[in-house]
Amino acid sequence: MYIRKVHFVLILCYLSQAAGNCSISENIAFICDYVHWREINHLIIIDEDIDSVCGIKTIKDNLKTLMNKNIYFATYPLLTSSEATLNITSCKTAVVTFLKDNFTVINLLEDANFIGRYGGKVSWLLLAHCHLQTNIMNELRYGNFGIDSDIAIDDLNSTQYEITTNKEDSILPFRYNFNKTATNSTITCVNLPSNETQETRYLYQIYNIRRNYNTSLVVRFLGDWNPVNSTKNLKLFWPIEDRDNFHQYPLVVGIHGTPSDGPMKEQEVDTTQIYYADYIFQFLNSSKSYVGFVKLGNRENNEWTDLLHALVDEVVDISGQGISKTTGKINDMAFSFDILKNSRHIYVTPQESEKLRNIFTTPFDSRLILCVVGTGFILSLGMTVNNWVRHKLGGRRREFSESIVWCVGIFTQQGSIWKTRSLTEKIIVLITLFLTVLTYNSYSAFITSILSVELYKIQSVTDLLESDYKIGYVKNGEDEDYLRSVNISELKQIYLRGYLQHDLINISEGLMKVTSDHFAFFASGQSARTHLLNVTKGRCKFEIQEIKIPYTNEYMAILMSKNSPYKKLINLSVIKMFETGVYKYINSAVYPAIKQCMKHASFQSARLADLSTAFFIVLIGWMASLVLMSLECVWKKRRIIRGNLKRRFQNGSDTAGAINAQLDFDTYVKFLVRNNAQPFEYRN
């Protein structure tokens, strides 16, 4: 339900000096009908001739009429005297000005600029008491009033404006008249003869889409009024909520976090920064205009800087991104309805411990090992004695080493090729298996107890501060300003550790450092998630854990100037955003969810490095088995090896003698050749 407030009316009457007949009495019927039509029931009269005999008589004559219509009024002599009343009143105020003969354009624009400072709080009615010889709208379009202004013009001449015959084409009658400038001319007004009365009046509504855009004046014909039909022929006055068409006039949007300050082309703007702005552009049918700022800004020497300074001075109309609500900003600027709930987070990469956990041999205490070895030795000895006794009775003889191997096979649950034939062997097997079951059950229970211990994870700010993680945040950014402004001990420690240790330029650099180092990054969730999505391109490249900080929750909204004429329209666009369901899509893009690569393990798991001891033992076992196998082969073939070595030694001696003899013969032959001698004949 639309709840209508009780309005407060201020009627300022500039009585024409030429019309000394006190014109308010002639227009009292129209004024009363207009006030009733606009649902206004308080009236203040400001008249420069209020103290004259005519003024006092007029008030007395119309006092009963105003009171009968439940219209309350007061009087002031000057327009400037009403400024204090306009500043302190919280009700809607209407200003009715009588257009008098030979008034100047400069004075008219000064009045328009004065009324324009109050926006929709003041309803201004320009009431003609004569036939204007100049197009009054052509002069008013230079006034500094905006789209939220409440201005109506009454005219006695129905043929003065084209809008009466071609309403649709003349809604922006000066759109293509760019070169026209205001002049300090005098507007002439022809008074009606004293014996004639004007019963029909024509009413127009005007407003500027943009202040100081003299081509953006919107003119809307409301209809005509006469004493018989009263306001029946008048259309409804357009409230600010119905003025949601900018007719492609620009809406200037400020964006922070850009490489440099200054105007930007649409192609240069990061699309993730203008989701809300794009919707507002479409909703208001406005053209796009962007101004970039490196920083959002803060308050220095009682002055805002960067983007915030531009918003306060109305250099830009709105912020393109959601801005967090703080007390300082709320006092000096205006926010739209909330568009996002944001909070600060800590971003870390879950780190596995690099410490070697000897989970394979740790369960085996030295006493347990000695007990098992002793038991095996006793069983092997008993097995040997049993075999020796059976050998005496005609059975196969087994040595002590074979008994040890047989017991080790049972202990390791590997079995053996032996078949237990005697009661003694069966009892030994049962005892060995029983001991093996106890050993392996103890081992498995111990390993389970180790791996069931919950991993140590950083789940809060306290865990982070107690860890050896390095901490960082973007220097000279919003997050640093936030840490510096809050009075929470944990966040103060984060501020100090980050200030002393690391100097990060932007959020992307901080997130990349998280993935490659033992590092924790403090940042706004909205900014960090957006940058993380850009870095990973929507794929699961890094497993980054987001640690929420509940007491950093804040609400974000579109930021505007305190006196911005677009406040209601921006709020209306936010409402429509929620109603149409577009908000869910925009919110998913502005505040994306972190892609979970895999569910974080809550318990320790055995790593390959943890089994290094087992691999080491297996390797030693292989080497030992090779050595033992070689020794066993040598031992079994010791006689053959001994014989081969002996024969090789003897053959080696014979071969050496033959070689020496061959060398002596060769030397003799060379001697004969060298001396050209005949070989001597050996005779016996």
Image: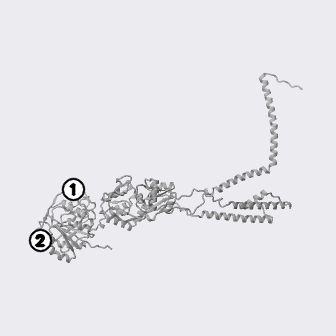
Question: Are there few (<14), some (14-19), or many (20+) residues within 10 Å of tag 2?
Answer: few
Quarter of the figure with the C terminus: top right
Answer with mark 2 or mark 1, whichever residue precedes in sequence: 2
Residue at the spot of label 2: 53
Amino acid beneath label 1 = Thr
Residue 245, how many percent across, how many down? Answer: 30, 63
Residue 363, how many percent across, how many down? Answer: 65, 61
Image-quadrant location for residue 393: bottom right
Image-quadrant location for residue 269: bottom left
Residue 492, how many percent across, how many down? Answer: 44, 60
Amino acid beneath label 2 = Val
Q: Is residue 219 visible?
A: no
Residue 614 as seen in the image, left or right of residue 490: right
Q: Which mark is residue 181?
A: 1
Question: Are there few (<14), some (14-19), or many (20+) residues within 10 Å of tag 1?
Answer: few
Q: Nearer the viewer, residue 422 or 677?
A: 422
Q: Is residue 636 above or below residue 285?
A: above
Q: In front: mark 2 or mark 1?
A: 2
Q: Is residue 630 visible?
A: yes
Q: Nearer the viewer, residue 557 or 237?
A: 557
Which residue is located at x 58 percent, y 62 percent? 604
Q: Are marks 2 and 1 in contact (CB under 8 Å)?
A: no
Q: Nearer the viewer, residue 48 or 196?
A: 48
